[in-house]
Amino acid sequence: MLRRVSTPPSDSIVSELQAMRTSIDALSERLGELAADNRQLREELEQSQTARTELVAQAEHLIHQLAAARMEVRTLKGAAS
């Protein structure tokens, strides 16, 4: 009984496999870049959200202070009359 002997891959198959490997390597590198960009964008988004929250709190505080100042002015005008 004869054993089946595998034939070495042809040059075209080797070239195609090498091209696939190059493509996979490039895709892996690009995926790493995209993941890094994503991390950076998430950090920037978090910083923006924090800044927005702080600005809203400051605006609310200023509105409250303005309302208190208006009430004080009205009180002073009423006392002066």
Image: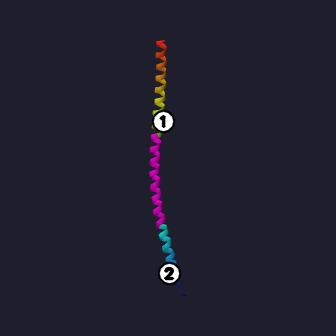
Q: Residue at x 47, y 42 (%)?
A: 49
- Outermost residue to the front: 81
Which badge, 2 or 1, is on the more N-terminal residue? 2
Pick the front one: 81 or 26: 81
What's under tag 2, amino acid-wise?
Asp
Q: From this viewpoint, which residue is outermost toward the bottom?
A: 1
The residue tagged with tag 2: helix, strand or loop? Answer: helix
The kind of residue on which mark 1 rests is: Val
Where is mark 2, residue-wise?
A: 11
- Residue 41's place in the image compared with 33, above or below, is above
Residue 5 placed where, x, y %? 52, 84
Q: Quadrant of the N terminus?
A: bottom right
Query: Of tags 2 and 1, which is closer to the observer?
Result: 1
Element marked by disc 1: helix
Q: Determine which quarter of the picture holds residue 54.
A: top left
> Which residues fall within the magenta stretch?
25-51
Q: Is residue 62 magenta?
A: no
- Residue 46 in picture, x, y percent from top left: 46, 45
Count residues near mark 2 (Cα–Cα under 10 Å), then give few for <14, some for 14-19, many for 20+.
few
Pick the front one: 29 or 56: 56
Which dot marks residue 56? 1
**Residues tagged 2 and 1 counted as in contact (Cβ below 8 A):** no
Callout count? 2
Which residue is drawn at the image coordinates 47% and 38% (left, top)?
53
Categorize mark 1 by other alpha carbons within 10 Å: few (<14), some (14-19), many (20+).
Answer: few
Residue 75: image location, x then y, percent: 48, 16
- Position of residue 22 measured from the top left corner of the image (x, y, whole percent): 47, 70
